Amino acid sequence: FFGPAWMLSPEMTPAESSAGGADGFELLPGTGVLKKVLSVGAGEDRPQTGNVACVRYTATIHGEAAPFDSSEPNQDGVYEFLVGLGHVVKGWDLVIPTMRRGERCAVRCPPEYAYGKAGNPPSVPPQASLDYEVELVDFRERERQVWELTPENQLAAGERHKSEGNTAFRSGDWQAARAAYTAGTLYLRAFLAGHSAESGAITADTALADVPPEVQEKLEKGTELAVALHLNAAQCNLKLKEHKGAICDCSAALDLDPRSVKAYYRRALAHLGLEEVERAQADLEAAQALDPESKEVAAGLQRCARADENRRRRERQRKEKEKKAFANAFGVGGAGSPASSTGPGTAPLAADGRGWSYVPDPPPGLAEAMQNAFKRDPNALQKAFAREPDGPAAPARGTDGAPDPQPSPSPDPAPEAVPATPDGGGGGWSD
């Protein structure tokens, strides 16, 4: 980057500075900073205070050849900072506003325009002059922070992010859509909380009846937009199978609108994705109470019932396998000697009637068989419940040594398509 001629040139005298400098350097008026243009930029625009400047640079202590710092470690080798706000050395805040896009220049900063008397240990010693080579790649206006906007601009920013999210959603980019929707909620949160000086009458604790009609209208519009953004973000999370994120967005929407059928419905879908059937059932029942005619909510309740039955069936199968393994270990309850019970309301576990019944009393002969087994092998119980890390339990064997036929569990139904809206209305794929 740096040419050795100007990097290793001696310090300039006051006479040289007033005459325009040595090696093509020019003194910035009213400062001690020297600049030499190495490559002319394009256009007439220059960065203003508060703009974001994007630069490539190397930094060298004057008189030394090896750079002590550069922008290379940054993404694309570009360093970004806000111009004129003291985020960089003083010399940069003076030089960057004189540059055009694409311009490359050499800059020499005396200590008072660099790190001063103290330096910046261990890289920069005290009272060091610094040489920079800087390329202004680009600059742009900084996006104003949420709290810096007026309420009207906060609403407009929320609408803009919603539109951007809708565009990304249509293209199937769920992550980009979610990011846009989530960013929009930040502006609406500031609006509803009254963070701006001009919205002092609009706060989260303000009752609608206590505010002027024009403020009430704005508050209702902001609430409606915030709910839509949260619901759309929840829909993206469902697409991405980020079920916990969907639950958070739906809960935020319900905080703003406790009568949102879509929020209850989408939160129920997220609970089902986490196999939280009871919570999904509760949300769907709340949605049905608000909209008894919704076909999608009714279908969701049926899906909950199937999920609950599948869960119960898997639990029964698990218990059956454990009991068969226990019985085989001690020679009790195998094929040819099915368990029996006279207790009320009991039923065999297997479809062919050969399992154990769900009864509190142990099968006949179990205690004696356990005692005999432990006498023969103290590790009998441990061996009985030994399993392969990821494999099934060993099949039970009957009196003839052949494996017992195992009933084939019915497969889980295929997952249902997720409707875009719970009420099948004009909401389409997003709010």
Image (spheres, rainbow, N blue to C red):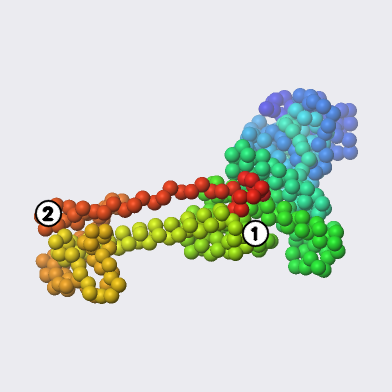
Label whose residue precedes the other's in the sequence (2 or 1) = 1
x and y, in percent, of residue 371 in the image: 14, 72
Task: Report whether 115 appears left or right of 388.
Answer: right
Task: Report whether 107 appears left or right of 412.
Answer: right
The residue lying toward the viewer, choosing from 215 and 348, is: 348
Name the kind of residue labelled 1 in the image: Ser
Residue that label 2 marks: 401
Task: Report whether 30 appears left or right of 116.
Answer: right
x and y, in percent, of residue 267 in the image: 56, 57
In terms of secondary structure, where does tag 1 sit? loop
Residue that label 1 marks: 260
Task: Tell me the residue at 74%/47% (across/down).
Answer: 159
Task: Tell me the residue at 21%/61% (across/down).
Answer: 354
**What is the C-alpha distance between the residues marked 2 and 1?**
61 Å
Does 331 sit above or below residue 107? below
Task: Report whether 340 appears left or right of 281.
Answer: left
In terms of secondary structure, where does tag 2 sit? loop
The residue lying toward the viewer, choosing from 121 and 59, is: 59
The answer to whether residue 78 is seen in the rendering is yes
